[in-house]
């Protein structure tokens, strides 16, 4: 039985018990129920029905998952770990927030902890109570969330309310996600997806002859989860005196994780270094376009710096990739693009043809910059080189476990 199912059943049992006590008290006093008791009884019954409906849905889903697991076990052979095929419904769509994606689970969790469907989670109360052990009368929901989410020796598993808010801050800050990378919420340590490795090659044939065409070639792409950690330092006094500090801590966590995600997505060196595989050095053989043995400046290109984006974009078009969404580069490179001059000393516009291969909208490819792309790379004798990434970023999958833990480091900062 899942933790969520157990929480919902416990909440339902408490409500049923409360209604029984209410009726028993009226019977013992040899009277009918009061109007106030009728309202309370009716509200409890509405929530009990909602809980029963949700528990039924969870039971159906568990049965479906079990059937799928048995099917994979029967035909999957040597797949190790918990494998899950990702379908489009299991991915966040462009512009969709994690809070929206997890809305039903968030409502279930609130209900199970007595918060009510409309009860907002207070990050300030949660962090303050975690660090100081002090809770006020309005923090019962946050206190119960901490108590029920404790993981012995590993911090507290944070509520989905807080998790979704932090992830949405990451989504709005990480350049790879702004460019269109797809978030895949993961509930397994190992998750498999299908990857197209070769396009089909159709061929003309005579009547009655054999088919010489070749079909698409697929391979398995495996998510193996890695852990990204961050430390935020705040005094107990500050937590007690500034009610809005919890939101600032939440925002800071999101921004730090966004920078870490950008660096990993572009330059991650793989599981041997406890990192994901990044685009530049991954074994997927991502096409790379050189600007010369010793590199070259964007400003040296003819007719202007925009050729630094045009050349790799059309390298991908040549490989049948016609849905390019964005380019990501260092701030220095973006400045050289947007300040490219014309012969009459005005700023050069990006080539209009770029808009016809853009995946989103009718404008040219979106351009993003991040300081996670270095400007001191060595290429031949060049030591101030940089990278520019361009492509259909929706094909970059970023797997995120729908779990996050927070712990207090009292000993480290006791001095």
Image (tube, helix red, strand yellow):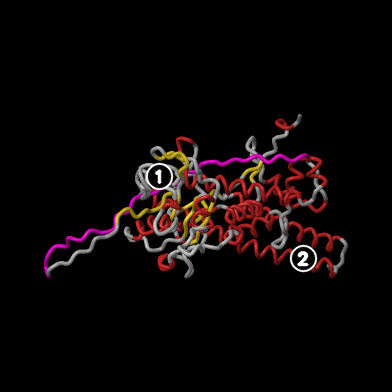
State whether residue 289 is above or below residue 208. above
Q: Which residue is mark 1?
A: 295
* Residue 9 can be seen, yes or no: no
Q: Residue furthest top?
A: 415
x%, y% of residue 199? 29, 58
x%, y% of residue 106? 63, 57
Q: What's the distance in space between the residues labelled 1 and 2, CA to CA?
A: 75 Å
Front label number (1 vs 2): 1
Residue at x 72%, y 57% (from the top left corner) = 115
Residue at x 48%, y 63% (from the top left corner) = 348
Lower position in the chain sequence, tag 1 or tag 2: 2
Q: Which residue is mark 2?
A: 41
Instruction: Write down the region rendered in magenta.
Output: 207-235
State whether residue 98 is above or below residue 290. below
Q: Is residue 408 magenta?
A: no
x%, y% of residue 125? 76, 49
Along the line of sight, the residue nearer the viewer: 378 or 140: 378
């Amino acid at each position: 039985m899942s933790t969520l199912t157990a929480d919902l059943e416990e909440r339902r049992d408490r409500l049923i018990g409360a209604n029984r006590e209410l009726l028993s008290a009226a019977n013992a006093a040899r009277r009918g129920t009061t109007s106030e008791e009728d309202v309370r009884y009716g509200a409890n019954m509405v929530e009990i029905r909602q809980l029963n409906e949700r528990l039924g849905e969870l039971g159906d889903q568990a049965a479906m998952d079990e059937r799928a697991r048995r099917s994979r076990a029967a035909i999957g052979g040597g797949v190790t770990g918990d494998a899950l095929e990702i379908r489009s419904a299991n991915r966040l769509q462009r512009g969709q927030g994690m809070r929206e994606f997890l809305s039903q689970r968030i409502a279930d969790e609130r209900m199970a902890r007595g918060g009510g469907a409309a009860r907002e989670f207070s990050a300030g109360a949660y962090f303050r109570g975690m660090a100081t052990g002090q809770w006020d009368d309005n923090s019962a929901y946050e206190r119960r969330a901490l108590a029920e989410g404790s993981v012995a020796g590993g911090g507290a598993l944070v509520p989905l309310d807080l998790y979704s808010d932090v992830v949405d801050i990451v989504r709005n800050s990480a350049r790879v996600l702004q460019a269109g990378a797809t978030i895949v919420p993961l509930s397994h340590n190992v998750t498999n997806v299908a990857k197209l490795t070769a396009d089909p090659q159709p061929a003309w044939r005579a009547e009655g002859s054999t088919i010489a065409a070749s079909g698409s070639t697929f391979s398995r792409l495996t998510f193996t989860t890695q852990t990204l950690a961050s430390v935020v330092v705040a005094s107990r006094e500050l937590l007690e005196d500034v009610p809005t500090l919890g939101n600032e801590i939440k925002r800071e966590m999101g921004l730090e994780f966004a920078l870490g995600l950008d660096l990993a997505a572009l330059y991650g060196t793989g599981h041997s270094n406890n990192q994901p595989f990044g685009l530049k050095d991954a074994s997927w053989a991502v096409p790379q376009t050189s600007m010369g043995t010793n590199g070259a400046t964007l400003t040296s290109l003819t007719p202007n710096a925009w050729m630094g984006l045009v050349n790799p974009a059309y390298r991908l078009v040549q490989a049948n990739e016609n849905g390019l969404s964005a380019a990501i580069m260092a701030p220095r490179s973006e400045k050289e693009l947007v300040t490219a001059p014309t012969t009459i000393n005005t700023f050069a516009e990006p080539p209009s043809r770029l808009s016809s291969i853009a995946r989103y909208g009718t404008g040219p490819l979106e351009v993003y910059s991040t300081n996670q792309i270095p400007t001191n790379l060595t290429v031949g004798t060049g030591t101030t080189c940089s990278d520019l990434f361009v492509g259909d970023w929706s094909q970059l999958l970023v797997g995120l476990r729908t779990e996050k833990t927070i712990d207090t480091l009292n000993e480290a900062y006791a001095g």
